[in-house]
């Protein structure tokens, strides 16, 4: 089997409407409107299609006093139009969030307790 050469060209919209920072903000707003306040946008990664590009933004539950606990899904933002075009189902993200919470419950609870103690000092 021989290796096939690919002519990889990075597509660039004439006027991209979403850079990485904007994609993260778009996803944070989408999550707040549709799922809940504990989920936040992680670091966007650009993906390329033959004539198109988008941002894949990981979704991470984050707890006060502890921080992010892992990735539970992804939201995809079209770079050219600056809109959400695909996402992991809310049910799947909620299920994965519950699993991560159960796996790290002691640490999350301890982080919340430290935060409360600091607020009351």
Image: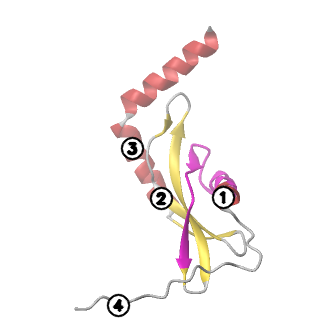
SS of the residue at dot 4? loop
Determine which residue is flagged by label 1.
30
Determine which residue is flagged by label 4.
4
- What's the mark number on residue 100? 3
Colouring convention used in this rendered image of the protein: secondary structure
Relative image position of residue 108 (x, y in whole percent): 44, 30
Q: Is residue 52 positioned above or below 36 on the image?
A: below
Spot the residue most to the right. 15
In three-dimensional space, the C-alpha distance between marks 1 and 3, rounded to whole angstroms, equals 21 Å
Q: Is residue 80 positioned above or below 3 on the image?
A: above
Q: Is residue 103 positioned above or below 111 on the image?
A: below
SS of the residue at dot 3? helix
Q: Earlier in the sequence, mark 4 or mark 3?
A: 4
Q: Earlier in the sequence, mark 2 or mark 4?
A: 4
**What stretch of residues is rendered in magenta?**
25-48
SS of the residue at dot 2? strand
In three-dimensional space, the C-alpha distance between marks 3 and 2, rounded to whole angstroms, equals 12 Å
Q: Earlier in the sequence, mark 3 or mark 2?
A: 2
Contact? badges 4 and 1 (CB < 8 Å): no
SS of the residue at dot 1? helix
The mark closer to the camera, 4 or 1, is 4
Determine which residue is flagged by label 2.
73
Local packing at callout 4 (Cα closer than 10 Å; few below 14, some 14-19, many 20+) is few
Q: Is residue 67 positioned above or below 76 on the image?
A: above
Q: Nearer the viewer, residue 115 or 35?
A: 115
Q: Nearer the viewer, residue 93 or 45?
A: 45
């Amino acid at each position: 089997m021989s290796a096939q050469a690919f002519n990889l060209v990075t597509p660039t919209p004439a006027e991209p409407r979403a850079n990485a920072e904007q994609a993260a903000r778009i996803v944070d707003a989408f999550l707040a409107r549709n799922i809940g306040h504990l989920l936040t946008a992680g670091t966007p990664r650009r993906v390329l299609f033959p004539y198109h590009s988008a941002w894949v933004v990981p979704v991470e539950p984050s707890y006060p006093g502890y921080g992010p606990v892992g990735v539970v899904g992804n939201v995809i933002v079209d770079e050219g139009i600056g809109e959400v075009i695909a996402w992991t189902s809310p049910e799947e993200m909620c299920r994965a969030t519950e699993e991560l919470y159960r796996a790290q419950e002691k640490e999350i609870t301890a982080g919340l307790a430290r935060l409360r103690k600091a607020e009351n000092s």
